[in-house]
């Protein structure tokens, strides 16, 4: 079996109103940071500091020096504007929940 010299990965970043998903081919053995740099995604969001964002692979947190595998999807996560617990508290105070309306509670 031949050793693969290149891998294909995706780099994704999203704002509330817009998202970018870039597919790139890069050398095998590359890191998350190298993929982000090669993708040029930071240039598509010049108003955002992507270097300060948390990173993930397929929904699991990862480090910038993680070695990539063919087919990986790198996700760049925006900082939270409000903590999830605080959101739940605010919704509860309004008689709502994160899962939907109170009218559907207990049905199913």
Image (spheres, grey):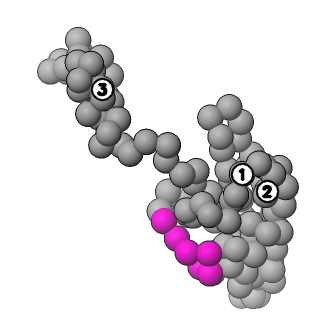
Q: Where in the figure is residue 34, as x and y percent of width and height? A: 75, 75
Q: Which residue is mark 3?
A: 91
Marks 2 and 3 sit apart, C-alpha to C-alpha, by 35 Å
Mark 1 crowdedness (10 Å alpha carbons): few <14, some 14-19, many ≥20: few
Prevailing SS of the magenta stretch:
loop
- Which quadrant is home to the C terminus? top left
Asked if the residue under mark 1 is in contact with the one under mark 2, i.e. CB atoms within 8 Å, the reply is: no
Q: Where in the figure is residue 88, as x and y percent of width and height? A: 29, 34
Q: Dot 1: what SS?
A: loop
Task: Using the image as rendered, state which of residue 31 and residue 108 is in the foreground.
Answer: 31
Please give the range of residues in magenta. 61-66
* Most distant residue in the top direction: 103
Q: Is residue 49 above or below residue 82?
A: below
Q: Which residue is mark 1?
A: 48
Mark 3 crowdedness (10 Å alpha carbons): few <14, some 14-19, many ≥20: few
Question: Seen in the image, is 75 located left or right of residue 39?
Answer: left
Question: Residue 24 occupies which quadrant of the picture?
Answer: bottom right
């Amino acid at each position: 079996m031949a050793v693969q010299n290149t891998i294909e990965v995706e780099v994704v970043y999203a704002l509330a109103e817009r998202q970018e998903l870039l597919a790139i081919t890069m050398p095998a053995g590359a890191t998350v940071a190298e993929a982000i740099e090669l993708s040029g995604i930071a240039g598509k969001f010049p108003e955002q500091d992507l270097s300060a964002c948390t990173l993930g692979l397929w929904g699991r947190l990862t480090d910038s020096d993680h070695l990539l595998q063919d087919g990986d999807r790198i996700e760049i996560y925006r900082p939270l504007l409000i903590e999830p617990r605080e959101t739940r508290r605010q919704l509860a105070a309004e008689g709502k929940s994160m899962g939907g309306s109170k009218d559907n509670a207990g049905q199913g």
